[in-house]
Image (cartoon, rainbow, N blue to C red):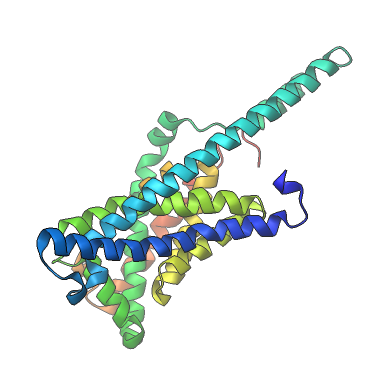
Amino acid sequence: MLTDRPNAKGLQLFYAAVPLLISFIMSIVSFFAAVFIRGFYYHTNLAEEKAADDGIVYLINYGLQIIIFGFWYLTMLQRDAREAAGSRSETSSKASRNRSEKKDSPTDKKSETASVREWHPISYWAKRLPLLIVLGYALQLAVSGIISVLSSALPSLFSAYKELVQSLAGESVDWLTFAAVSFLAPIGEELLFRGVTYRFAKKALPVRWAILFQAALFGIYHLNLVQFFYAVAVGYLLGMLAEQAGSVIPGIVLHIIINLSAYLVPAVFLDNIPKAAFTAVLSIVIAIPCCILLLKKPRGTRK
């Protein structure tokens, strides 16, 4: 097997970085596809406008992410399921051979059950959906408040970032950009980073380092110094959530809430430094217990 080779870990890390490179290629392809669509159907030249802010570019880009990384992620899930089934079959065979020599004790059975973690969607959403909603909005308020305070002290550093935010969440944003950024981007990015990238990274690194690795790539992906820092923090949280839940779905929901919340931050919360600082602190205070409750391991699971 590949994992038995001496250089397998390095190769897995390389595989973990490949999706990021593919996503950059997708961005280029999406731009030229949008130029063609604009010129052919709408008779406008995208190159003469704000190309990076065009909703068609985002729509194509994130649509490609969902298709390609979604297929890749599902393929990895199926392969892991086959390997797990083979492992269980082998374990069952060994257990049957040893059954005549030693009966399973209640403790052994309890330990075996505890080692298997299953994600139950109905139970998960019933208990954690409100936490995801509150946490998503709190994180957006916290980031907005912190950036508002820092941008007052370092306006030149944050000028480009403010222009980017205005193009994505400003009053003049078109519905294509809104739909792509709010719904398609979270799905595509979670499949890319917490799906494919994280699964490769886990084969080469301990879980916590694998989570940090995919979070760092998530920060690089945004190609913006300001976004890098909070994207790494949020990416780490999303990675922990994916590991705890055993699924990318909760992370997709939280990511959607965070992105949607960018359109729901009242300007009055950030119109001066004291208000922005208070908003950031209060949001962090609310977010911390939500994180603790979300990431708390269910009973009957093993660390």
Horizontally, residue 193 falls left or right of residue 211, namely left
x%, y% of residue 32? 28, 65
Relative image position of residue 298 (x, y in whole percent): 55, 36
Of residues 95 and 302, which is closer to you in this image?
A: 95
Q: Is residue 157 above or below residue 289?
A: below
Is 7 on the left or on the right of 122, as rendered? right
Is residue 107 depicted above or below 294 in this figure? above
Q: Going 53% across and 38% down the picture, which residue do you hit?
A: 77
Can the viewer see residue 251?
Answer: no
Q: Residue at x 70, y 47 (%)?
A: 2
Is residue 175 at all visible to an observer of this figure? Answer: yes
Q: Residue furthest top?
A: 100
Residue 209 point in image, percent of width and height: 63, 58
Compared across the picture, whether 36 is left or right of 99 comes to left
Q: How far across and how far down the image is residue 55, in percent?
A: 21, 61
Classify the position of the N terminus by image quarter. Answer: top right
